[in-house]
Amino acid sequence: MRQAKYLYLALLAVALLAPLLGLYPVFVMKLLCFAIFACAFNLLLGYTGLLSFGHAAYFGSAAYVTGYLVKNLHFTPELAILAGMAFAAVSGLVVGGMAIRRQGIYFAMITLALAQMLYFVCLQMRFTGGEDGLQGVPRGNLFGVLPLASDTTMYYFVLALFVAVFLLIRRIVHSPFGQILKAIRENEPRAISLGYDVARYKLLAFVLSTALAGMAGSLKTLVFGFATLSDVHWSMSGEVILMTLLGGVGTFLGPVLGAGIVVALQDTLADKVGSWVSVIIGVIFVVCVMAFRRGIVGEAFALFARKKKSV
């Protein structure tokens, strides 16, 4: 526990000094946005045992809502982000209400089907810009006072929200509510026999996950100034699953590391190998799943535990 605290503090110090260390702020902001997305998905898969194939719907819909409100209705960034999260949460409530009583592949397919419906809605709606996307979204002024046009200012805003989300998820997992989620993941019939309303707990976890995924999408729109169909496409759902499994399902740092690896590979290899970057990432994923079943962080923690036990 103490070692984990020191590790978190060291990583936070590196994140705070990142702009001074020569790291490109926009790249790190992209990494943090997808890390929030992966952490939100991990709350659902890693701690509740629900595999959603449609999480891009909440990421992308919140991105569109936030972009539209900032660009056309001149909302301040924090209000637009809250609106995007609210839309994602309500969407999650509707989808979860229909899907949550199904299990396994049936749950996954329902989430995928409903997410694809939203994708075609975004394709046809005029305010989304269709295939061109929603372009030219300004960052605006935080609370109407602090301008976010500077990459450095925007970076620390995104970092603050990432830290808040990370701590919130840790608090949720270690709370009595989180322990019930773990019990549902491990043995749902037993949780039912103990008197817990399993459907209600799973729905609440689903809504929390979609709201945080919406925050990630909203931040991504403000960072880059646009929202596109790729944000709601099924491939985005696949990417967040890849990030979570690669880093380590059911761990706190796993999704963050997985997001960092995928984003870094995409940015580094995109200009060199073009569309082959997806093939390379796929190969890495297959190797990792075969060699590191718990993910990189999960295997590292298991190795550390075995060494500690043997001493």
Image (cartoon, rainbow, N blue to C red):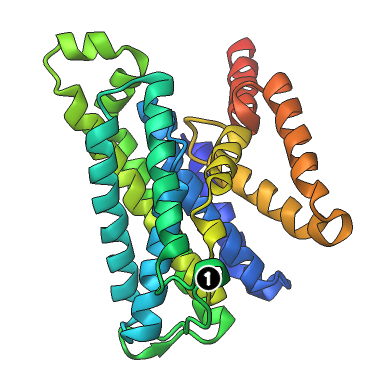
Q: Position of residue 128 (x, y in %)?
A: 44, 70
* 51 lies left or right of 233: left
Q: Position of residue 79 (x, y in %)?
A: 28, 74
Give the farthest residue toward the front: 124
* 255 lies left or right of 292: left
Q: Is residue 200 above or below residue 23?
A: above
Q: Work out which quarter of the rendered image holds the C terminus and state it.
A: top right
Identify which residue is drawn at 32% across, 12% down.
187
Q: Observer-nearest residue: 109 or 242?
A: 109
Name which residue type carries label 1: Gly
Identify which residue is drawn at 37% across, 71% down.
66
Q: Quarter-wise, where is residue 280 in the image?
A: top right
Identify which residue is drawn at 23% across, 44% down.
93
Q: Position of residue 228 (x, y in %)?
A: 53, 65
Q: Residues within 10 Å of mark 1 (few under 14, many from 20)?
A: some
Residue located beneath label 1 in the image = 133
Identify which residue is drawn at 30% across, 39% down.
206
Q: Observer-nearest residue: 1 or 137?
A: 137
Total numbered labels: 1
Query: In this rendering, does residue 161 appear at all?
Result: no
* 133 lies left or right of 14: left
Q: Quarter-wise, where is residue 238 in the image?
A: top right
Q: Position of residue 2 (x, y in %)?
A: 48, 38
Query: In this rendering, does residue 300 appear at all?
Result: yes
Q: Observer-nearest residue: 277 or 109?
A: 109
